[in-house]
Image (tube, helix red, strand yellow):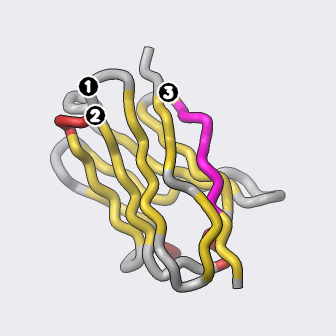
Amino acid sequence: QVQLVESGGGLVQAGGSLRLSCAASTSIFSINAMSWYRQAPGKQREWVAGSSRYGYNSYVDAVKGRFTLSRDNAKNTVYLQMDSLKPEDTGLYYCNAMTYWGQGTQVTVSS
């Protein structure tokens, strides 16, 4: 079983930045795909970004050029650097690895 703990959320003004962290309870070196999802109020959870163990990252179009995902295998942690935040980025952000999910961290962007 893998436990995932997200942190780093908060309230920020539009144009600001936040860095989310997802700490895993086990080594992430062999986990191929680690991803971030978000869920805005009244909407379905959506995929935001994903990282493969081979160093390939992908992003939903809405965040390309603004969000950057990185992995630190030594710390068993995945990060999501979010810059130029917009009010539409508001939501509960979840970390995912295989079938495991974290509890989420809230991101609120004010206009």
Which quarter of the rendering shows the N terminus? top left
Q: Amino acid at mark 1?
A: Ser
Q: Earlier in the sequence, mark 1 or mark 2?
A: 1
| Residue beneath disc 3 | 99
Q: Residue at x 43, y 76 (%)?
A: 83
Q: Residues within 10 Å of mark 2 (few under 14, many from 20)?
A: some
For the residues labelled 1 and 2, say whether their Cβ atoms are less than 8 Å apart. yes
Q: CA distance from mark 2 to mark 3?
A: 17 Å
Helix, strand or loop status at disc 2:
loop
Helix, strand or loop status at disc 3:
loop
Q: Which residues are magenta?
A: 101-107
Relative horizontal placement of residue 111, taking residue 23 as reference (left or right):
right
Q: Earlier in the sequence, mark 2 or mark 3?
A: 2
Residue 88 image point, x, y percent: 66, 75
Point out which mark residue 76 bears: 2
- Quarter residue 39 falls in: bottom right
Relative horizontal placement of residue 70, taking residue 25 as reference (left or right):
left
Which quarter of the rendering shows the C terminus? bottom right
Q: Residue at x 26, y 48 (%)?
A: 71
Q: Amino acid at mark 2?
A: Asn
Q: Is residue 104 magenta?
A: yes
Q: Is residue 108 magenta?
A: no
Residue 99 image point, x, y percent: 50, 27
Helix, strand or loop status at disc 1:
loop
Q: CA distance from mark 1 to mark 2?
A: 6 Å
Q: Nearer the viewer, mark 1 or mark 3?
A: 1
